[in-house]
Image: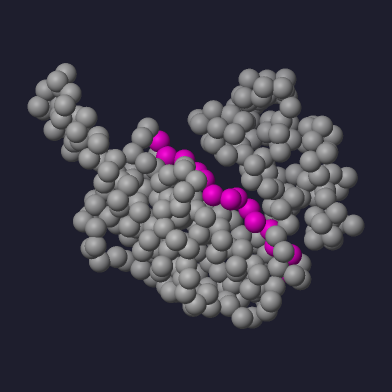
């Protein structure tokens, strides 16, 4: 579990690194911005990679979709409520640094405010607890953790036909442990910039069960612990016995489609995020028409 190592006052100078880097030999030019900031009781980091504005209509469409992801994630930072914590950006969308700086500043203000409210409530509860000695009370207060939010939206893979960005955030709100959130792998068609949201035909769920179970068996068999197919259900939380498709859409890698289940989605927190790769050849009958066209598997 990650821990918060340092607590600083809101408004202290922040380390910010801004860099542009090439897109790994492919033709989608991107800009990468990194920020690490601190409030009194929270740490915030942002790592975001966006297509350079104006290089093509498809790239601009991809960029706009990624900005929507950043907006959605950071405007609800530290809360699961539907209401936004701050308004969306209304400035010049072509200015990447201004755009990301806006979300950085607003997210820091939000997490700083919410973490202070949480801290004050916890302090009040501890101070009112008559069952604690002064020594115990001081120890708890001295070791009280702050919040942490790491926002990540980076390019994962690019080919001539598609590009994949991975949206993966880490959030810790002072409880027993942190967790991973985000949107997972986002696969875009480079021809038109459209997000291919469904790779697997949902109607194929029953037919794909052997492949999902094989992948999960391999995942749980790591670290010198061999799990047989018959033992797999002992590791899973399945009401009907059917393994669902993951909430995060599978995304293409060099070797096949990557399937990732979030914490608690099908297994205990201790199981981590079950993930595995299924070769393209095994998935052809179950892919959507859009996925087949994108992957050249028509």
Q: Nearer the viewer, residue 44 or 105?
A: 105
Q: Residue at x 11, y 23 (%)?
A: 133
- Rendering coords of residue 38 (x, y %): 29, 57
Quarter holding the C terminus is: bottom right
The magenta region covers 177-190
Q: Residue at x 85, y 54 (%)?
A: 289
Residue 202 visible, this angle: yes
Q: Based on the displayed image, in which of its 4 quarters is residue 248 positioned?
A: top right
158 to 267, vertically: above or below: below
139 with respect to 36 (left or right): left
Q: Is residue 223 magenta?
A: no
- Rendering coords of residue 102 (x, y %): 41, 67
Q: Nearer the viewer, residue 65 or 45?
A: 65
Q: Residue at x 62, y 39 (%)?
A: 261
Tell me the chief SS of the magenta region. Answer: strand
181 with respect to 105 (left or right): right
Q: Residue furthest left?
A: 134
88 to 131, vertically: above or below: below
4 with respect to 87 (left or right): left
Q: Residue at x 88, y 45 (%)?
A: 285
Q: Residue furthest bottom?
A: 54
């Amino acid at each position: 579990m990650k821990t918060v190592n340092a607590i600083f006052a809101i408004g202290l100078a922040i380390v910010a690194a801004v860099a542009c880097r090439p897109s790994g030999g492919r033709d989608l030019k991107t800009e990468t911005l990194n920020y690490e900031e601190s409030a009194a009781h929270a740490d915030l980091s942002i790592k975001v990679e966006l297509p350079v504005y104006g290089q093509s209509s498809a790239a601009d469409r991809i960029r706009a979709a990624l900005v929507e992801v950043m907006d959605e994630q950071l405007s609800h930072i530290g809360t699961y409520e539907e209401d936004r914590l701050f308004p969306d950006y209304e400035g010049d969308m072509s200015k990447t640094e201004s755009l990301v700086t806006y979300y950085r500043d607003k997210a820091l203000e939000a997490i700083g405010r919410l973490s202070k409210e949480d801290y004050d409530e916890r302090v009040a509860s501890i101070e009112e607890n008559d069952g604690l000695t002064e020594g115990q009370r001081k120890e708890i207060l001295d070791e009280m953790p702050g919040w942490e939010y790491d926002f990540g939206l980076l390019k994962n893979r690019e080919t001539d036909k598609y590009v994949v960005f991975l949206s993966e955030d880490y959030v810790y709100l002072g409880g027993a442990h942190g967790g991973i959130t985000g949107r997972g792998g986002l696969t875009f068609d480079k021809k038109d910039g459209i997000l291919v949201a469904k790779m697997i035909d949902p109607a194929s769920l029953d037919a794909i069960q052997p492949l999902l179970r094989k992948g999960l068996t391999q995942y749980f068999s790591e670290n010198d612990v061999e799990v047989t197919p018959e033992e797999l259900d002992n590791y899973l939380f399945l009401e009907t016995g059917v393994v669902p498709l993951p909430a995060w859409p599978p995304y293409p890698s060099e070797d096949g489609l990557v399937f990732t289940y979030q914490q608690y989605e099908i297994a205990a927190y201790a199981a981590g995020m079950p993930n595995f790769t299924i070769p393209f050849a095994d998935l052809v009958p179950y892919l959507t028409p859009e996925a087949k066209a994108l992957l050249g598997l028509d």
